[in-house]
Image (cartoon, rainbow, N blue to C red):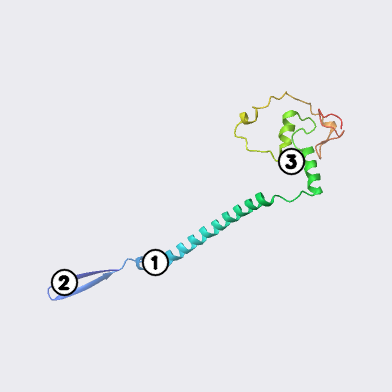
Amino acid sequence: MSVVPISWGAVAIRLTATVPGTAWQADSWTQVVPWLAVAWVAGVVLLLGRLAGGWWLTSRLRTQGARPVTADWCELLNDVMARVGARPWDRDHDDNRVLFFIPEGRGQIINDEKDVSGYPQQKMTRAPFVEADWDLATMEPKSGLYPGQKSR
């Protein structure tokens, strides 16, 4: 709100002009800003608590270690290890080396293929698709052996 005094000799007029919404906006911001600050501080405290909880869980794992693995988990790991990969029946040395890093806990992030002795050189393999040899509903071979798979 602005007040403008105007005078003509003995007559004095006092004009007041308000721009619609300006008085409400000024008052509302003075009420909202403290709550925004409280919400910001609450968010910072919440996220710091989450970060501290993660640090606590990590340090607990380092000091107490993990629980022993049950027989069910060992059976599941063996089952996954037997089936993992594009051709589990035809693994080479590099496949087995990488595969056994999992249960031994030796995995790490690879940034470049030079970190792990270069990119492996694979031989070209091809097999014709014979529709009669396959169960098309499950995409499993009817004989039980995949192309190139050695007998079990």
Q: Which SS class for mark 2?
A: strand
Among the two numbered marks 1 and 2 on one chain, the one whose residue lies closer to the N terminus: 2
Residue 141 in percent (x, y) is at: 84, 34
Report the residue marked by disc 2.
7
Residue 119 in percent (x, y) is at: 65, 27
Residue type beneath disc 3: Pro
- The 10 Å Cα crowd at callout 1, few under 14, some 14 to 19, many 20 or more, is few
* Identity of the residue drawn at 79% across and 45% down: 74
Screen quadrant of the N terminus: bottom left
Q: Which SS class for mark 1?
A: helix
Among the two numbered marks 2 and 3 on one chain, the one whose residue lies closer to the N terminus: 2
State the residue in front, 69 or 77: 69
Residue type beneath disc 1: Thr
- The 10 Å Cα crowd at callout 2, few under 14, some 14 to 19, many 20 or more, is few
- The 10 Å Cα crowd at callout 3, few under 14, some 14 to 19, many 20 or more, is few
Q: Quadrant of residue 121?
A: top right
List the single residue furthest toward the bottom: 10
Q: Tell me the mark number nearer the camera, choosing from 1 and 2.
A: 1
Report the residue marked by disc 1.
30
Cα gap from disc 1 to disc 2, whole angstroms: 35 Å
* Identity of the residue drawn at 77% across and 41% down: 80
List the single residue furthest toward the left: 9
Report the residue marked by disc 3.
103
Q: Is residue 27 left or right of residue 115?
A: left
Residue type beneath disc 2: Ser
* Identity of the residue drawn at 35% across and 68% down: 23
Residue 62 in percent (x, y) is at: 65, 49
